[in-house]
Image (cartoon, grey):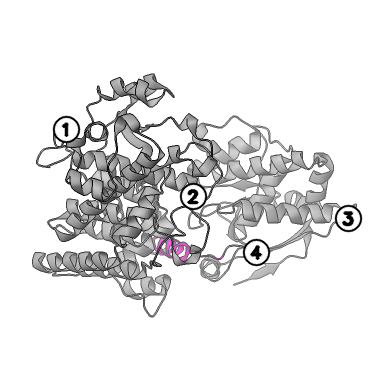
Amino acid sequence: MEVKVSQKTTMKQIFSSLLDDGKIFSIPIYQREYSWREEQWKEFIDDVRHSFRKNGIYTDYWGNILVFYNKDKNEYEIVDGQQRIVTILLFILSLGKKYEADEKLPLKFTESKNDLWIKLAQGKKLKQEEKRSSLARAKVYFEKMISDNTLDSEKLLNHIYNTQISIVVIDDEIESNLLFGRLNTRGLRLDDVDLIKHKIFYETERNSGPTNNDQALEKWRSIQKAISSFNMTIESFIPLWWETRYDLSEENLYNSFEKELKPIHYLSFLDSLLNTATKIESWRRNDTGSDNRLGRNLNWLLKITPSSKVFSVIIAMADVTFDGKISLLELLTAFEFARAITPPPSVIGKEVIGWSRLGVNYEFSDLDDAYIKFSKKVTSTGVTGLEIKKEIKNLKNIMSELLPEKEDFEELFSSLRWADKGDWYRRREEKLLSTYAIYTLNNWLDTVNHGAGEQYRTKDDDDYSIEHILPKGNATASEESSEYRIGNLTVLEKPINNDLGDRKLLEKLPAYKDSKYPQVKELLFKNKRKFALTTRKKRNIEWEIKNFDNNAINSRGYYLADCFFEKMVQLIES
């Protein structure tokens, strides 16, 4: 292998000398996506501004860029340094550099990403989804920083062209790929999934020719598309999928991958990943044509869980056929809600409503371990239905042990708030959790509008909306206002809610009586409520709708908490 190490040269010289005779930089398919974010962009622009203030002394040095010269394509394939070179070029574009349609670009991406790159380079209008890409957001970030700091774009562009970089050229493709697996880019280390991706693409191309390499790329992209629909990344999905099948106790993911799979297995490995992801995606979309309650709970679980390990159970459920999946997923969602409203040990002591009065610190790491253990057992070769039932029971026993004390749960639940705006800690999370709780409690009450074979509603009504019983416009104490508390919330049909506006409660009562939702009837009528009247009065979880006030909000919050807690216990014990 011949390695040519250039002397430090300027960006301007690279464009004029290295990239002569039609040569360009290109990003091979095994490279990860452009992954720098605001933290790295800020560091980059801080470096630039620091040297720019030195009045013409160009001292920025961007280190080495490792490339493989592909003679057949007349391209310098970037092996290491993609994040830096892309960022520098995006910064140049943000300074006003614009390439005409017939002008040679210095860099080429693969397929669809290249279309976006050309648009950015030529200053063309982007589609809405293109604006959300990291490439477009980086350019917008740099443009804003330049504008906010009133920097002279022309002088800064000249400065960038005179900053220095070294290009290391390798003429052996195999060695360049091996080096890729050992190198880091500035600021972000290559992770195990990056290395697995590289290994798969490189080996399938090397051993099977370009056709199979296209298959690998197509499968990889299909996996990414499927898992993006349920808000996961391939970097989080693959480790969880792998951990359900292999032991990682003594080695990292990449080493385990190399140990367990040979190159001839790589395409079937991708097929397995895709099958799992596609099955979960079909649940999320509920595209089976029947209301199976999997989609509703899966969508909520992905939004509210603070744990990534719970997804290993979803993976096992997708890969193995067994009874009880629906009730198990509903339990997982309800329990992860309880976990989400419970403060982790790291934030105990924060002045957060509902947290400071807890009697116990709750730790759920044992539950994460139980999720992984369950998934491994269920996906084991030859496991029987009876053994799976036993594992479900073991998992439920762990949940029972870790379930917060009822009094603590009441405090945490009743303290949840729903507000459109405010700068208090976890406002958005509380709004999401409150919405899930209110919708779910109404579903459990609704024994009329439910799916076939179920005793209660199994999906959220399209007309669901959150109604504040006492108008939220009355809130006067910011985050401490009772009007925001969950005891002041009910589910209500959107058309009714839209017509009511911010009226006083007594003016809204006639419209409430038109609602078909059982939760509204429970709000209005005592005989629709759970627990005996004497029990409700004794425990101070009773209210009069015509005298609904701050005390009633607190009482109803505890009542809703008790209803939710009782159902969780029922799901655990069933």
Between disc 2 and disc 3, the foreground one is 2
Q: Which stretch appears magenta? A: 189-205
Residue 483 position, x and y percent, is 44, 37
Residue occupied by mark 3: 54
Q: Residue at x 68, y 32 (%)?
A: 100
Indicate whether residue 397 is drawn in magenta. no
Q: What distance separates the C-alpha of mark 1 from that of mark 2?
A: 33 Å
Between disc 4 and disc 2, the foreground one is 2
Q: Is residue 403 left or right of residue 62?
A: left
Which of marks 1 and 4 precedes in the sequence?
4
Q: Residue furthest right?
A: 55
Discs 4, 2 touching: Cβ within 8 Å: no
Residue occupied by mark 2: 426
Residue 211 position, x and y percent, is 37, 52
Instruction: Look at label 2 and name its amino acid.
Output: Arg
Q: What distance separates the C-alpha of mark 4 from that of mark 3?
A: 32 Å
Residue 435: numbered disc: none
Q: What distance separates the C-alpha of mark 3 from that of mark 1?
A: 71 Å
Discs 2, 3 touching: Cβ within 8 Å: no
Please tell me whether mark 4 sits on a helix, a strand or a loop.
strand
Please tell me whether mark 2 sits on a helix, a strand or a loop.
loop
Discs 1, 2 touching: Cβ within 8 Å: no
Between disc 4 and disc 3, the foreground one is 3
Residue occupied by mark 1: 449
Residue 169: numbered disc: 4
Q: Is residue 54 left or right of residue 514?
A: right
Indicate whether residue 190 is drawn in magenta. yes
Please tell me whether mark 3 sits on a helix, a strand or a loop.
loop
Instruction: Look at label 3 and name its amino acid.
Output: Lys
Q: What distance separates the C-alpha of mark 4 from that of mark 2?
A: 50 Å
Q: Quadrant of residue 451?
A: top left
Q: What distance separates the C-alpha of mark 4 from that of mark 1?
A: 67 Å
